[in-house]
Image: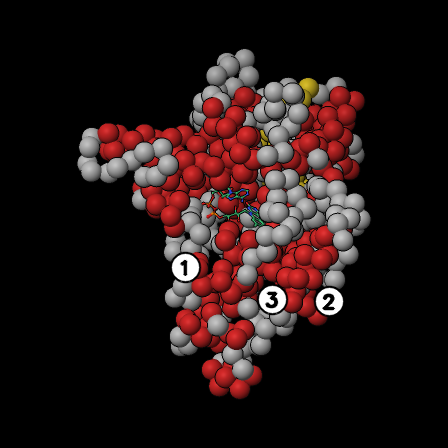
Amino acid sequence: MELFWHRRDLRVADNVGLAAAAGTEDDARGPAAPVFVFDPDVLAHASDVRVRRLLDGLAALRDDYRDRGGDILVARGDPETVLPALANALDADRVVWNRDYSGLARERDAGVRRALNEAGIEREAHHDAVLHDPDTIRTNAGDPYSVYTYYWRKWTDRETDPLAPTPEADDLVGADALRAAVGGGGGALADGGLEPETDSAAIDRVAVGDLPAPADLGFAEPDAELGPAGTDAARERLDDFLSEAVFSYDAERDYPAREATSRLSAFLKYGEIGIRETYEATEEAMAAAEEKAGKGDGDDDNDDEGPAAAVEEYQQQLAWREFYAQVLFHNPEVVTENYKEYEEGIAWHDDPEEIAAWKRGETGYPIVDAGMRQLREEAFMHNRVRMIVASFLTKDLLADWRHGYDHFRERLVDHDTANDNGGWQWAASTGTDAQPYFRIFNPMTQGERYDPDAEYITEYVPELRGLDADLIHGWHELSPTQRVNAAPDYPAPIVDHAERREEALAMYKRARGED
Ligand code: FAD
């Protein structure tokens, strides 16, 4: 029997570590007993939104195990003490998990490895979360990549691993056996398999399939409407996306009012769908598109356009996720520090009132406000709008990207340290392969280009409903009287874009030692 420790891989299917622990292809191994540990150190960095989403994902995972006659152990405490205690109580041969590449997770895993070694318990870590291990794609000189395009070329040329086999019922420890091992009927730690005086001291609580409520963990129910969680929901979304929208992804993905992207980010963040499964499905969509084009149906497909190229553009986004994972893996300090060194520090303006207006979605720049309100209502924001609001915070409000990162970290359901940090440092021109500092989005023309009919804007900014799109996109040019007549409850722009643009350029030039 082996203990499998779930972390950011809340799925049974295509789970490399779980398949190994369950002995799906090795009769000498398994069955697996899955466990999730609520670690106070990890919870200290969590948010209401993410705790709710995590619990939803865990409930779906538990149901998947129950469908197979199993269940999941749910423990609370420090994994360094919980895991050896549980492994002893269950008489497990080893503890198995999938690697997490962020700095904090790596520190925690090193502690768990030490604790298991000291307890004389075997352990094994697998590569699972990304298609290509962050340490394996390097330049010919052996360095990690800092330019995405070169990284992508190597990434896309690589062989991918096959899907990890899904454990069957007899590869898993049954629910009754789990209950017998930890004692009690799914409630608090009882005098069953765990020795109260030794092991239980390490664990606040262990239960079979009994999940806490957010309040039990010190969190509130979020106001935002979160989408569905779990593998079934992820597969449904992926299938739906790959059946049609993906074939025009390249042309449509930048328009926030169109449902043109996969909305898979939270599922990928919590590992509710495997990346091998996801990628393989895109390869099948690509093959179908190529076959269709090959049949001479009039589609003038070539390498740069057409349905197959659209699928490839989607794969490129999956590769951005892996690019940022390897940036974080090689540079764990980017979570708090600029990736790019400036000669002088950037002298951010950091006006608390302006930052607060940005967070509330009351800047008087309609596309920015729509994005910030989508974030509040759905714990999600469209990618193009994330780029616009991030540019606005850093280059119009001249505020340190860390204010934005912290706010996104608290509010985004798909918050992922590597991607969020990568996105922010890209927008702030401080990151790897970032937007050059002199490329400053104009929030009005961005809104006009990507939301021409102001559909997205008016969905989230009700004060502007009923106005002509021209008026909305020209909001900054209206006189105070015109604004009050048109939409009395919507604010005037809090800053002048043209002025702030000049200030931003000067700020970056000073930091670069160029003035
Ligand atoms: P799709 O367009 O369908 O893309 C498919 C998948 O590819 C996404 O689910 C995601 O896993 C990955 N992906 C797409 N774009 C990027 C990108 N630019 N960088 C890295 N991965 C990408 N993405 C997150 O997953 N978590 C974050 O915390 C996050 N924070 C961001 C912050 C900023 C300032 C910016 C500019 C971008 C951020 N992104 C983040 C990237 C991107 O906005 C989201 O991945 C995307 O909007 C999610 O929607 P989707 O699943 O429909 O994307």
The mark closer to the camera, 2 or 3, is 3
Q: Which quarter of the image is occupied by the N terminus?
A: top right
Residue beneath disc 3 = 497
Q: Nearer the viewer, residue 309 or 490?
A: 309
Q: Give the image location of residue 220, x and y in percent.
A: 63, 59
* SS type, badge 2: helix
Crowd band around label 2 with a 10 angstrom C-alpha radius: few (<14), some (14–19), many (20+): few
Decide if residue 395 is on the left or right side of residue 254. right
- Seen at 70% across and 48% down, the residue is 45
The quadrant where residue 28 appears: top right
Q: Which mark is residue 257?
A: 1
In primary-sequence order, the first of circles 2 and 3 is 2
Residue 251 seen from this side:
yes
Alpha-carbon neighbours of circle 3 within 10 Å: few (<14), some, or many (≥20)?
many
Please tell me which residue is depicted at 61% across the width and 60% down the height of the picture.
392
Q: Secondary structure at mark 3?
A: helix
Q: Which residue is located at x 50 percent, y 45 percent?
A: 265
